[in-house]
Image: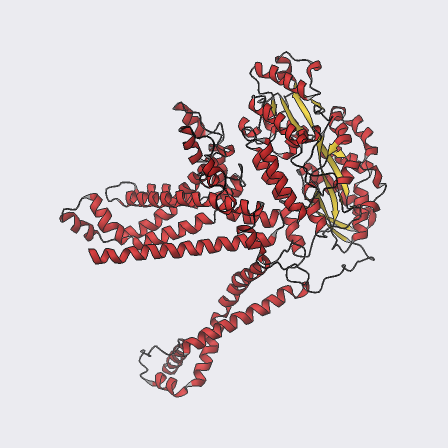
Amino acid sequence: MRRTLGLRGAAVAVIAAGTLLASAACGDNFDDGGAPAQQTTGPAALQILIGSSGDAETKAVNDAAAAWASKSGNTATVTPAQDLTQQLGQALAGDNPPDVFYVDAGRFADYASVGALEPYGDKVDNPNDFYQSLKDTFTFDGKFYCAPKDFSTLALEINTDLWTKAGLTDADIPTTWDQLKTAAQKLKAKGTMPLAIGDTRDRVGAFMVQSGGWIVSKDGKQATADSPENVAALTYVQSLLKDGLAAYPKTLDAGWGGEAFGKGKAAMVIEGNWIKGAMTNDFPNVKYTVHELPAGPKGKGTLSFTNCWGIAAKSKFKEQAIDFVKAMTTVDQQMTFAKGFGVMPSRQSAADQYKAAFPADQAFIDGAAYAQGPVNAPKMDSVLADFDASLNTLAKADPKTLLGTLQKNTQATLGG
Amino acid sequence: MSSVTTATADRDDRSAGGGRPATNGTGGRPRRRFRLGGGGIRRNERIAGWLFVAPVIVLLGVFFLLPILMAFWVSLTDWRGQGSPFKAGVPFVGTENYTDLFTQDGLARRDFMTSIRNNIYYVAIVVPIQTALALGLALLVNNRMLKGKGFFRTAFFFPSVTSSVAISVVFLFMFANSGAINAILSMFGISGPAWFSDARGLIHLLLGLVGVDNPPSALASGGPLGLSWWDWLSGPSVAMCAIMALVIWTTSGTFMLMFLAALQSVPVSLDEASELDGATRWQRLRYVTLPLLKPTMFLVVTLGLIGTWQVFDQIYVMSQGNPAKTTLTPAFLSYRTAFKDFEYGRGAAIAFVLFLIIVLLTLAQRWVMRDRDKPARRFR
């Protein structure tokens, strides 16, 4: 008798405690269906979450934010995230997102599709000055959501010493797939690994663009992974890998292509403009030149990587946040960022200034004209991660099978 | 003075629930009063009892039961991390997150089954080896003849107290292509593999030695739950083997300590008696020591099973599921699905399936170990 009472009592107590706590924990979250109340008067306290590439970037953004704050009479707190995706995910789930944050282009559609972002893109000054490919990247369902912060493109870096040692000259710098192969064979004959290429869609994908294909259609609604163009691209990369003309960084004992290149384990590498910083810091003695990627059967092609200044749909200070982004995307501010931590301005009107300041980066900025942004559709990350995993085995696998799997998974994700 | 003592004893008695007779010289008085008091006092007792356990119940409720129930709710929804999952408008999908993992042909099921396959190989190799190694080390350290026991005990236990992240990073260096492991292998003329980028399965490698490079047609197509038989039978990848080595090395120290504690409670006289009876060393180990270690063995195997099914930090630090998903485990997949892909519902569902797997395996293991005990007693 006593025992049953005790058990029942315990159960009642636990349920009671649970209900109480549940209502206490979630009570304030139940009634926030509509738009958040906007604070229009008084100084705003902007929270800015950034995924910083390092101290230089953190400092540059901090300085810019402080300048904006003192000029506009608001406050701005910049927080560099350890793991932006995860921290942002938690903040959004907790209904307390930062007002302004970096949004990676590959993640953009995930946020936009669930309504986490404020579509303010056309409210910044002169939105058509941004490169069209970057605007496309941050457009979802026809709405231009957020202003591109800056961008990077892929180019071909060549190690000058290894190049001349193999008897190659500037005339041999490849501009087509065939020339790339010829030059690679000459390098290989001298015992040098010709090309290091990252084993992800973010490098191999450039060949798909050069071949005229891509994983999804232009509007991001159709899967086009198994097109003959893509098969041709993967077959070409596979032939490079098979013949020992190219290798993945891991097999060269490097974490990424830049490391393999800096250590002199490969004479060429396909990387973006971030390689500049790595080379200056880690391998200051290696001389190299930067060139546009060799053109494929359908012309030039490269990939672009970018972030935008996302503004939370649930922010209380949207007006001030847009004002902040305007200040961050002026040509002058973008040039300050470019000098501070080596990114390229997302505004076309800054291109000439940039080229004048960094003549060696001509190839990177020229790529903007024909660059392809990341796949712009929600829930695609795991599908693309699966594709990356299969690219690991590209040297032995059948390109058609790899792309067939990618096509099937992409279709399932886009359709559902 | 005396009255104060009585009062204290009195209060003690009530809060202890009444079963204990008062023995400290005050005779039957408190007991009698307790009986006379009847229900009233007992009601007070019950309230007091609840008050005493309330902190624990609240703590367990807030930090254990409630989050589990909330996670279970999330696993039934398609919540994508926007605001609270408990408000109206969060799409309720029933068991779809679970059926996606088992019956729906697609990426979700293939990823999940790949992670299950990887973890099965991982458990099947790590648990027996770490248990055997821990037992061996404990027997070694427990040896009466051994000098410098303290040193060996510390040396074997040391990996267990070091941070797993730090050890993982050290292993990354050791297993690098030009790292220590491959340098040692090359001394014997073996060119070691590129450990953390080698996705080939061990069984596939062995089959390759006898000339079976491509899957026989019977295995290539068809197979349960979205993976072909050839994929199921791949064996752990080379990369996974490096992680296994690390885990075996770090955990066997902890388990050695448990075996050691149990060994030290085995009476020496038993060992000596069996020695006098003419038992060999092996017989003494097999028929005297091991049966006495059975409860500890159960503990070690259970903890080993639970720990290996939940492996996460080594994967997170060393490989993130790469190469080619051969080090993907359910725990890591759950994390990745929820926090990287924003599919919180499916991530929670994976976690619950993992929980079920662990519970079922522990029950099965308990049944196996108990079952074997009975016939043994009957026949001996």
Residues A40 and A270: in front is: A270
Furthest-left residue in view? B277
* Snapshot colouring: secondary structure
Furthest-bottom residue in view? B36
Q: Position of residue A260 (x, y in %)?
A: 58, 26
Residues A226 and B154: in front is: A226
On the image, which quarter does residue A401 sit in? Answer: top right
| Number of numbered labels in the structure image | 0
Please determine whether, in this image, residue B50 is positioned above or below residue B82: below
Q: Position of residue A35 (x, y in %)?
A: 77, 59
Residues B93 and A253: in front is: B93
Q: Residue at x 55, y 49 (%)?
A: B334
* Whether residue A346 is visible: no
Quarter placement of the N terminus of chain A? bottom left
On the image, which quarter does residue B363 sit in? Answer: bottom left
Q: Position of residue A414 (x, y in %)?
A: 67, 45
* Whether residue B82 is visible: yes
Furthest-front residue in view? B218
Q: Residue at x 35, y 86 (%)?
A: B32
Q: Determine whether, in the image, residue A331 is placed left or right of residue A237.
A: right
Q: Residue at x 61, y 43 (%)?
A: A382
Residues A47 and A403: in front is: A403
Q: Position of residue A80 (x, y in %)?
A: 67, 44
Furthest-top residue in view? A167
Q: Determine whether, in the image, residue B6 is placed left or right of residue A372.
A: left
